[in-house]
Image (cartoon, rainbow, N blue to C red):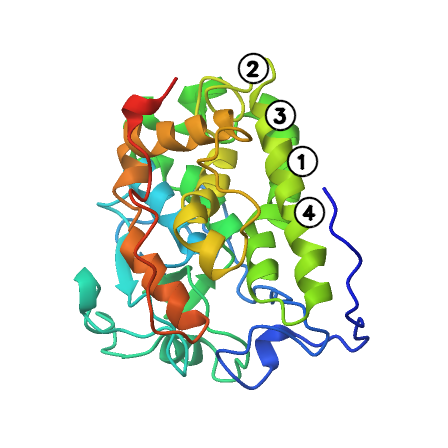
């Protein structure tokens, strides 16, 4: 796929998009969106791991999310998928990005304030953990009530922790070790899952943001084309042996979770609001397998469907790009299961 050459001039100065001086300024001086690196990178481990500062314990940790963010959605799905609701508290912020970042409001079923300290902003929790913190205040993150700090704010690492760190509290049949090849990150698929995660993150998960927040024509075109080439690649992947109905066969893996939270937002938000408008996922002239995969996860798996809030993430993205009008469509947000072929 190619577009005519752009007349835009590529800038040469690159700055961290997280330190541009404005919550709403998502691009750097070069016109590109550069995602900041997560700062808190400790790990929760099973309680029998020696000398670990963050051992798995019941009711010690809190998962902070909102309903707009796809990175937070990953963690929310895993908490539900692994049946960790009795052990890990969930706190939900408003999905609208305010002048100082994410905040509490009580709207649409979210928490009215932080239940631990009474804070009204995500910012206050970050500064509680580290008074010198000076980057974006992101979700998701895991909070430790015992040491009163953020354990980790990198979604890919959070979902790895949720996959198995708390398995000792679950029935034997629900533990990853027991599931074997049916686990979320099974040993025999780890190399393939890691390889797929890498290019899906770069071209699709982060690709929609790099496309949507591009501030120059050159920046936009340099990301939107690779985005759709990557979607074409997933479509081809799903046509191959042992790559259906899920990305790696008969069982859901973390690769499915990581891709789902971007693609369930695609037609309803990214296509219009982020200008990812070459094709919709529901366009079965191009994506019959990808569309089937998405609907299968949404309609047949409660963990995916009940954590998906179309109106909330549409409203959230409208505010993120500093607009007021929320698109009505597409209608329906996702096509019904009975159209599966």
Q: CA distance from mark 1 to mark 2?
A: 16 Å
Where does the image place residue 217, in percent across and percent down from the top left? 69, 66
Where does the image place residue 54, in percent across and percent down from the top left? 44, 55
Label 4: state its secondary structure: helix
Taking depth in this image into account, of 158 and 327 the one nearest to the observer is 327
Q: CA distance from mark 3 to mark 1?
A: 16 Å
Whether 281 is drawn above or below 139: the answer is above
User: Does any portion of residue 16 appear in the rendered image?
Assistant: yes
Asked where in the image residue 97 lies, by quadrant, the reply is bottom left
Label 2: state its secondary structure: loop
Q: Residue at 30%, 56% (x, y): give it.
A: 328
Q: Earlier in the sequence, mark 1 or mark 2?
A: 1
User: Left or right: where does residue 150 sit relative to residue 115?
Assistant: right
* Tag 3 residue: 236
Q: CA distance from mark 3 to mark 2?
A: 12 Å
Which label sits in the foreground, 4 or 1?
4
Taking depth in this image into account, of 240 and 64 the one nearest to the observer is 240
* Tag 1 residue: 195
Which label sits in the foreground, 2 or 4?
4
């Amino acid at each position: 796929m190619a577009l005519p050459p752009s007349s835009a001039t590529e800038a040469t100065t690159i700055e961290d998009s997280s330190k541009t001086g404005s919550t709403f300024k998502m691009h750097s001086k070069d016109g590109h969106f550069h995602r900041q690196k997560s700062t808190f990178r400790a790990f929760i481990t099973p309680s029998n791991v020696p000398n670990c500062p963050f051992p798995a314990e019941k009711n010690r940790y809190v998962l902070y999310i909102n309903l707009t963010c796809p990175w937070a959605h990953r963690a929310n799905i895993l908490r539900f998928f692994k049946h960790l609701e009795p052990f890990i508290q969930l706190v939900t912020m408003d999905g609208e990005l305010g002048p100082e970042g994410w905040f509490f409001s009580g709207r649409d079923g979210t928490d009215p304030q932080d239940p631990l300290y009474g804070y009204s902003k995500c910012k206050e929790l970050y500064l509680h953990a580290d008074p010198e913190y000076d980057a974006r205040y992101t979700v998701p993150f895991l909070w430790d009530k015992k040491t009163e700090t953020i354990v980790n704010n990198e979604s890919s690492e959070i979902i790895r922790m949720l996959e198995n760190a708390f398995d000792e509290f679950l029935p034997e049949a629900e533990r990853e070790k027991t599931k074997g090849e049916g686990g979320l990150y099974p040993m025999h698929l780890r190399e393939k899952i890691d390889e797929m995660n890498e290019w899906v993150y770069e071209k699709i998960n982060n690709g929609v943001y790099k496309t949507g927040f591009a501030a120059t024509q050159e920046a936009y075109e340099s990301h939107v084309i690779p985005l759709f080439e990557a979607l074409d690649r997933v479509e081809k992947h799903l046509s191959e042996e042992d790559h259906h109905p899920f990305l790696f066969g008969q069982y859901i893996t973390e690769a499915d979770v990581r891709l789902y939270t971007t693609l369930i937002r695609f037609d309803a938000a990214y296509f219009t609001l982020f200008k990812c408008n070459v094709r919709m996922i529901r366009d079965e002239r191009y994506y019959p397998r990808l569309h089937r995969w998405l609907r299968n996860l949404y309609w047949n798996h409660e963990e995916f469907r009940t954590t998906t809030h179309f109106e909330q993430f549409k409203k959230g993205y409208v505010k993120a790009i500093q607009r007021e009008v929320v698109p009505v469509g597409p209608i329906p947000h996702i096509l019904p299961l009975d159209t599966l072929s």
